[in-house]
Image (tube, coloured by chain):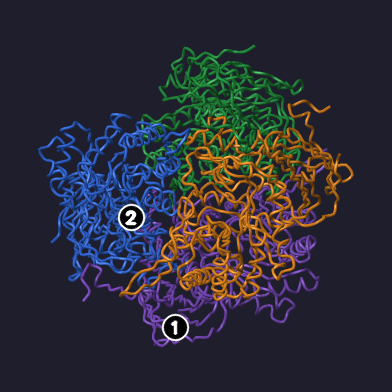
Chain colours: A orange, B green, C purple, D blue
Amino acid sequence: MRITVAEHPCGRLSDAWRFAVGTGRFELALRRDYQDSLALIQREIGFRHIRGHGLFSDGVGVHRPYDYRGERHVRHAFTYLDQVVDAYLELGIRPFLELGFMPADLASGDQTVFWWRGNVTPPRSHTEWADLVRATVGHLVDRYGLAEVRGWPIEVWNEPDLTDFWQDADAGAYHRLYEVTAHAVKEVDAELQVGGPALSPGAGDDWLPRFAEFVTDRSVPVDFVSRHAYTSGPAQHVPFGVHQTLAPAARLLEQFASPRQQLAGTPLAELPVHVTEFNSSYRPDNPIHDTAFHAAYLAPVLAGGGDLVDSFAYWTFSDMFEEQGVPTTLFHGGFGLLTHRQIKKPTYHLYAFMSRLGDQVLARGADHLVTRDDSGRVTVLAWAPVDVTGRDPVDGHTVRLSLPVAPARTAFLLRSSVSEEAGNAWRAWCELGRPASPTAYQLDLLRTAAEPARRHASLPVVAGRVELDLHLTRHEVTLAEVTPVTDETPPWWDERRLFGREPS
Amino acid sequence: MRITVAEHPCGRLSDAWRFAVGTGRFELALRRDYQDSLALIQREIGFRHIRGHGLFSDGVGVHRPYDYRGERHVRHAFTYLDQVVDAYLELGIRPFLELGFMPADLASGDQTVFWWRGNVTPPRSHTEWADLVRATVGHLVDRYGLAEVRGWPIEVWNEPDLTDFWQDADAGAYHRLYEVTAHAVKEVDAELQVGGPALSPGAGDDWLPRFAEFVTDRSVPVDFVSRHAYTSGPAQHVPFGVHQTLAPAARLLEQFASPRQQLAGTPLAELPVHVTEFNSSYRPDNPIHDTAFHAAYLAPVLAGGGDLVDSFAYWTFSDMFEEQGVPTTLFHGGFGLLTHRQIKKPTYHLYAFMSRLGDQVLARGADHLVTRDDSGRVTVLAWAPVDVTGRDPVDGHTVRLSLPVAPARTAFLLRSSVSEEAGNAWRAWCELGRPASPTAYQLDLLRTAAEPARRHASLPVVAGRVELDLHLTRHEVTLAEVTPVTDETPPWWDERRLFGREPS
Amino acid sequence: MRITVAEHPCGRLSDAWRFAVGTGRFELALRRDYQDSLALIQREIGFRHIRGHGLFSDGVGVHRPYDYRGERHVRHAFTYLDQVVDAYLELGIRPFLELGFMPADLASGDQTVFWWRGNVTPPRSHTEWADLVRATVGHLVDRYGLAEVRGWPIEVWNEPDLTDFWQDADAGAYHRLYEVTAHAVKEVDAELQVGGPALSPGAGDDWLPRFAEFVTDRSVPVDFVSRHAYTSGPAQHVPFGVHQTLAPAARLLEQFASPRQQLAGTPLAELPVHVTEFNSSYRPDNPIHDTAFHAAYLAPVLAGGGDLVDSFAYWTFSDMFEEQGVPTTLFHGGFGLLTHRQIKKPTYHLYAFMSRLGDQVLARGADHLVTRDDSGRVTVLAWAPVDVTGRDPVDGHTVRLSLPVAPARTAFLLRSSVSEEAGNAWRAWCELGRPASPTAYQLDLLRTAAEPARRHASLPVVAGRVELDLHLTRHEVTLAEVTPVTDETPPWWDERRLFGREPS
Amino acid sequence: MRITVAEHPCGRLSDAWRFAVGTGRFELALRRDYQDSLALIQREIGFRHIRGHGLFSDGVGVHRPYDYRGERHVRHAFTYLDQVVDAYLELGIRPFLELGFMPADLASGDQTVFWWRGNVTPPRSHTEWADLVRATVGHLVDRYGLAEVRGWPIEVWNEPDLTDFWQDADAGAYHRLYEVTAHAVKEVDAELQVGGPALSPGAGDDWLPRFAEFVTDRSVPVDFVSRHAYTSGPAQHVPFGVHQTLAPAARLLEQFASPRQQLAGTPLAELPVHVTEFNSSYRPDNPIHDTAFHAAYLAPVLAGGGDLVDSFAYWTFSDMFEEQGVPTTLFHGGFGLLTHRQIKKPTYHLYAFMSRLGDQVLARGADHLVTRDDSGRVTVLAWAPVDVTGRDPVDGHTVRLSLPVAPARTAFLLRSSVSEEAGNAWRAWCELGRPASPTAYQLDLLRTAAEPARRHASLPVVAGRVELDLHLTRHEVTLAEVTPVTDETPPWWDERRLFGREPS
């Protein structure tokens, strides 16, 4: 069945898919591979904000107590904070600040999370914590200007509903932290945007309503609410990795939708909702992240998520990420759109394809999204259905469209695809024998293999329409760019004369 | 029929194909597009020397007579010469000097060639010409060092057998110029390499023997002999272009071979032979240069030319070339491997494929060349046969090879192809309606379309051999890189668990 | 006498000094040295527009007649136009279009100007000329957008009052050309800005009034008026150069002022006035351009010109300029702010100093200009008086100022100077023996010598004021940047302990 | 008194001063500021090797035990090792490998050193340690080639004579570690260069003889011996810093000389000696490192150290160094030649000056070193004497030289200086109020202030000699480059005509 796409837009494509992206801990941003990767991503995708953990962890060195003349003082030091934020702004991306974890010298306990030991206990002094927040946010305002920093959302802590991330998952302690923090932020400037509670997918349904109740009752400022979304089952461990079952991608969209449902009727009902992390698996060592399947799996989420929330941030842009320690092989199931050394994974291309869409939505479907931009170019993102069990993979699927184009006799089609066969560096890496430490030549092969397959064609335009049949192979995600052609061929051109044949 | 490629090399691949490349007139090298193009080519191909016309033409400004106190003096000015040669050396390429054309103030007549008016008349003072040569070569030696400049061949004039390039095609006048020039060069340093006579394909068979006789009789130094090779018929003009018939590519190899044949038995018989220009058509406005046909047509020439001569220089590396004036459209039949703005033509890829071959030749054939490098990688260049009349194009052709590889269970294949469909920016440009001045978006499309099709696969190695079937489409040139694989897959890897299925 | 600078601004510093800059002929912009030079200048100075001759000369290849089926047609080709304008916009500068000279195939005569032979005769067909203008401007609008091109002034021809630049300096013929051209521009879009008549300093006083009368009488569109300004006397020739007397710099300001005076009372009285070329000497081979004198001579012009006109464009930004042929030595008296290979001349620094001024003018004087920016930084440009005869050079001069600064105990002073001794690459080049073709080491020395002398100091702030004494040596131009200091020195700092002395 | 420098060289300047440089812990090399800093240093100084701690510490992630089917295995992972060494080689510098500290999972205890917690206990399994060494060195040989890695010295551990760096400073345990390690290295290849014992300045005089005795008795391979050199007294703590007394610089040269003295008569007497760390203070928070004093203090060490040892490595090239945690202010007394963000300290320039010396030594003295290179350029490094107590600083000092130069009438002098006033970014930073987190404008000021003062002059050459008087201010280090001039001034040049005066 061919779908006839209407000429008039049925909506606009929101920026929610690119509003934010996740990153490994804060000071990793000092690394060159990190910055090179982010530069590439900004050039080809263009996220607006970046969010990660560890701003206040000891590796960034902000909170620095010292003794002078027998008294305790605290110096707030922004050496690395400035280096990182300067780099972000140069790269055209802005912070989505997450305030955490706890500086060791301010912590009330010694529980840590991750290989890099982020302290997840409440402050032993809420006053000193408030000073830290105020000093940091104030410094950012001084350095980058109030107009700039007002555009950076400020989130309080991460997944306080999990014992791994907040000691005892103590909601009351979180509420207190939130209150102190929100006020400290607003003391710097009342229009700064503060929010939370950055819940994990496992948070009980009452977490958010209780948070709403708390802030309402106590008139605590809140400018947005946030949560996370993941779809994987329990980790089955193998050395240096895990395997997990996955729920269908629709489950992600349901998680996106839940905050508005849970807050309906509360004073927070109209607030922006940010999904400050999402992915399939929450593990940085699940090879599913590296696959072509993963791009096809997430395609409908990217295409449709913007209808449900103000942002949803892919966790994370790069494999330069060390929650489980230093990766031991190039591909290792990391979250990254890019591996170390900037090899593009299929999901990278899904994002790159999204960035080439127009902002007028002409049609949406279970396997496609059709847009147009102001120049008249029509762009189709289409994807093959997937089976999350891996048992019944879909090996052929066709999307048939009739597209409206501007007056012309022909249109130029550029089609770009990633699939099991194409734009799939992981597959090439497997074929290369899974080299832990690829040589320069192997890295070059992988970069080549990582590029999408491209083909172009001249399509006839009949009655203002192009008929486009997109045949998709297993796990394929494809972008079709259709541009009406202005023909400048001169009247004397005769292809038959190319080889010197005299004109007849 | 499958060809079983022997394990032991049957020869070495010479550097003749990359020893030199042609360029538009000297001062075009001051341009940014030129230098950007050359940088790209050096990165991906890597020529050793570069040769073009016009070193002594007025646009370079070397020969500068002036009056002082009533007398004529000449200043030799190297402002642009230095800028160009500095740039060449930074780009990793060295001059192949061509001494010509005539400075207007030193010319005996006013006949010029090309839109840019190179003067092609003998000097009115051979003394002043000798001064010019000596001063220029001497300056180069001072600036770049004797060891460096001794490696730059120095050719005297261009195609003196044609009335367009040398007034009256006067052999006697050329011999005199050659003699004066060769001596002037050797006065700077006896080990500098000087040669000629840079004959056109139309030179009579006696031109070279007479040149040999002249230099022998008068003991004139000569370190190499040079000629050009082209295969096109007469120009059939259309606005801003020509069409021409083409002789088969074998005719180029015959032209390569002729100097050694003609000089057999003379004292010049053992000298290096440089084909200082070659191409199909000698016109910079014949669209054949832009086609996939052109790569397939020249493939056997690149594969085999090194057996016949010491170098053969593709005329020219870039469309930044103005013999017929400023090009009016992006694709216009220029000689370039690259268009303006660095769009790669199919013939560019033929050269880039050559640069990835190993230096051990394992097999040669009418449609293939098999090599290996020291790392054990086996590389196959294969090409489809072509029909130069365009009447009976070959639409399918298969090369079947049994390749010897180092011990391994599998080999990784990367195959790169250009053809009518792939790596063919000209085809995409035609489909875009032949835009004279492409927009930024169109240029981006063309750069994408210009990349070869790539595919990779894992091939079984059986008894130290890989069976490789290369199916070639019309005008296809393909490069297959075959690398034996070291398998680092850990014992616990089980692809069936990718989607979280419990191990059985 | 110390000048007490008031705290409240007396005006704003206009952008007229940086609104435009001159360049050599249009296609020189294709060169790498040109683009590298412009990139440097945009980074450190930041001009808004760039203007030069030769857009329609044959080297750019726009006007391309051809015969097809026995009839004359014209193709308008934008190959190089696009390359140049694309490059300009990437470098952050916009065209100030000058429409001229005449394409050879459209010219009514063969009179040319300059070594590069710009044709200066009227069109043989005003219709074909109008087509050329319309096609070119229309193409620019298509490619860069109407909003963008409306910001580019469009000037008709260059110095039609001189026989060198316009055959017979025929005012009537110019008026006709202007009329045809202005209408052609406005046919593309009525809000495009067209103007003229780009008069030389030697134009009689009635030229502009007659032009005003002509356009008024015939209702010809005119959006701005333009003229040039130079102060040099007749050329005294030496080989490869000239010497000329100079009038005082005040004469330049008088020339700037004249169009408004001449147009007072006419309908053109309120139009913007652009000085589309100015310099001391109008010769590209007068060494005065290379000197420290030149910066001090022009300093009051840059400081004050913006009060008189909407722009005044230094002729030219680079020595990559070929009106008199290819320069024979690195320094050769070219117009450039930069030599070939980007050696900065003293006048370059005058412009770079201007670019660091704030936009609030606090004080102006015969030897100084004091500004402040929004951050509170106070900036002083000061210059030594000069003697244009060279007979009585001023060897010492002091500017004493009392500057208002924001509350602080100290201020940081950075002072940058160029003078006979400092920031004077030409002097270093003379000391090096005037090498025509400097070696890499010499170029490195020259780049080092070209940097201004810098010194910094801590100045006391007393009652909100800093007392600043600027002693100037011969031909010195200096920039003093004064920034109030926030002292973060910790209480425990004791410089006496630097070498380990125990605290007392 | 003027020193007459002889024309004939009295020796060659060895490369010992640039053979190696120190760095913060291994994985800091992944950072961008680190790599940018190293790139700058390689461009302007050019070290050969780089050495730092922590190759085997957990942040690099090499030693990775895991359980599989109930058994312990170890994976050796080179993800970051490769990224770092790839970067080093791209930057033109090679590793000087230091094997240490102990991976936590291989350690016998939990004693650590530094903020970043390097484990300093012996391995709990010498077999597993030997595997780690063999696997790592073997991997490097595989990846970079044997010829390359044979050029990298391999040092066993760091300062085993200190309890901070080696548990209990147990010499016997070190000897055992050395033996196991040296054999493991030689198993990979017998020509790899292994050595130790990397002693601290505080090691007793018998440490090295006992090491020599141990390796001799047990025939343990040793290719070089190594020690460290520092001159500071005990740390006097203030918040975020220390002060220390300093011994005169001659004490460093004595430390350099001691290994050869201590090993005289042993079988190790002829081995290369590497001072693998040296500096004034061994603390990364002593502001003395940032001063102009420091450059003058070390000048005689750099000038003379190469006579005593094969290398002496400045500890360290960059302030990107975290032994005491993240620095809290831009200048903080770090070891670096560069601060974070590449502000050059005075000692940076001392090294940059050294890199411009020729390799023929013409004269040496207590305050100068005179060299010449093959082009004939004579280069003088001179320095002011210093007082290490800071009580009697030397405020004026003159070095008078008579220098031999090639035949010429004049010579060009370029003089570059750092001193209290010039090239002293730390002084500027103090004047700016010691901003902890400088703004972009302040960083720009600091970069400007960090450049040496430069002046140039034309000096007369009389009888093949230039008389050079170098007046030095407090803590000045100066470089004078003297180049004989070839005068190309044309006969018609008359400076009096510059302003247009007619010739007389």
Q: CA distance from mark 2 to mark 1?
A: 43 Å
The answer to whether any part of residue C117 appears in the image is no
Q: Chain of mark 1?
A: C
Whether residues under marks 2 and 1 lie with C-beta atoms below 8 angstroms apart, the answer is no
Q: Residue D88: x, y in percent?
A: 40, 44
Per the image, label 1 sits on a secondary structure element best described as loop
- The image shows residue C413, relative to residue C435, as above or below, that is below
Quick one: A218 or D425, which is closer to the camera? A218
Between D501 and C351, the one lying in front of the other is C351
Task: Using a 10 Å C-alpha cutoff, classify the residue at mark 2 as few (fewer than 14 neighbours), some (14 to 19) or many (20 or more).
Answer: few
Q: Position of residue B118 (x, y in %)?
A: 58, 39
The residue under label 2 is: D114
Q: Quadrant of the C terminus of chain B?
A: top right
Q: What is the three-letter code of the residue carrying label 2? A: Phe
Q: What residue appears at the point 64 percent right and 11 percent down from the top-left corner?
A: B1
Mark 1, residue position: C407
Residue B462 percent across, percent down from the top left: 55, 16
